[in-house]
Amino acid sequence: MFLESISIINFKNFSERSFSFDEKINCLVGNNGVGKTNVLDAIYYLSHTRGYFNAVASQNIKHGEEFFVLDGIYKKEQREEHIHCSLKKGLKKVVKRNGKAYEKLSEHFGFLPLVIISPSDTNLIVEGSEVRRKFMDMIISMGDKEYFHDLIHYNKVVSQRNSLLKYFGANFTFDKDNLEIYDEQLVSYGNRIYSKRKDFIEEFTVIFEKRYQHIIETSMSDHLKEEVSFLYKTQLDDLAFADLLKQNLEKDRILQYSAAGVHKDDLLFQINDHPVKKVGSQGQQKSFLIALKLAEFDFIRKKSNLKPILLLDDIFDKLDDQRVGQLLHLVNDDSFGQLFITDTHDLRTEKLIKKTGQSYRMFSL
């Protein structure tokens, strides 16, 4: 599977631009601010029906315009796939596959697997648990529609339950029977989510640890004795979900929101049994994140039987040529498919790309 071409209209800083891509390596080079990352975000949009860097859809429309349009032509399993995505201010987003609009955007999710590695991925380490839950949920959902639908329904029930708790608080009443209706649904959806998250962590951890060790070995790191761990933190390990809700009932009533459940789960990232956030050097954190993302690639490839498109956004920044070469070496084998790279150093990038022996195309912005 690969992206043959993309047409961009009124998306972020672009008025109108088209690109025809190589099926292996594509390099977008130019100074900061010219829109290299925006091209990657447009490609991401066609896979995920939303932007990677800005979740507010209308803010992706070029300033002063009323709409944006993205059109991509893909080759997937010897068949051409035309994906269209458009948004006009005040209207719903439209996503079409081969001219036919999706009734639900969720139907498209996972059809064109894609992984992006970006400097903004540091949020996985430095931000709160919600960012890491979304990371985990996105990977599982790519290959499991039932999980994706359970997650949507679970989050909807949590929202409804929270609204009821706020209503109780505003009116100084408490209807336990009505709340139990939501609790039954939460337990049903939540237990399935919990079970699949545990299975995912068990499988993903092995892939991640292998990727991390490969990265530090090929970078000739002095930290070859580093042991990394990727742990699932959940309240359901200690108490059944139904009992957990009962135990937190009074707390929820006072706080007026649901304080317990799988929507509070987290992932713990550690090096040598200590939090990466606290003890990891800048280099260790970067290696940890790249390993996470390459493990995401490996996991999705295994589940989908497709090689996801890989986007590398400005990750060569502050890396010397040797380390850039080592990173390219990691993705230069038959397990990887189409690759997109952004960089500010055109000569350096092309020199290193040539060493891979792969076909490539350079784009100057």
Image (tube, rainbow, N blue to C red):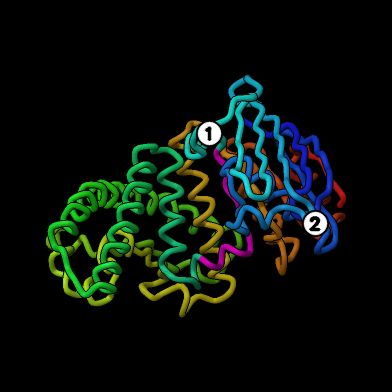
Q: Which structural element holds mark 1?
A: loop
Looking at this view, is 353 or 157 the one in front?
157
> Residue at (75%, 37%) from the top-left corner?
6
* Image vertical order of residue 260 relative to residue 83, above or below: below
The residue at which mark 1 appears reads as: 111
- What SS does tag 2 mark? loop
Identified by mark 2, the residue type is Gly
Relative horizontal placement of residue 50, taking residue 191 as reference (left or right): right
The question of residue 76 being in magenta is answered with no
Q: Is residue 287 visible?
A: yes
Seen in the picture, residue 253 relative to 143 is either above or below; the reply is: below
Q: Residue 171 carries which label?
A: none
User: Of 13 and 80, which appears nearest the observer?
Assistant: 13
In this picture, residue 18 sits left or right of residue 25? right
Amino acid type shown at disc 1? Phe
**Quadrant (top left, top right, bottom left, bottom right) of the N terminus:** top right
Position of residue 229 relative to residue 186, above or below, is below
Q: Where is residue 280 in the image (x, y as percent from the top left)?
A: 50, 75
Q: Which mark is residue 64?
A: 2
Instruction: Using the rendered image of the protein, determine whether residue 241 is visible from the camera's viewpoint.
Output: no
Q: State left or right for residue 103 relative to residue 175.
A: right
Q: Which of 333 and 309 is in front in this view?
A: 309
How many C-alpha atoms fall within 10 Å of the one at disc 1: few (<14), some, or many (≥20)? some
Q: Position of residue 178 (x, y in %)?
A: 17, 57
The percent position of residue 55, horizontal first and vertical second, equals 58, 57
Which region is colored magenta?
113-123
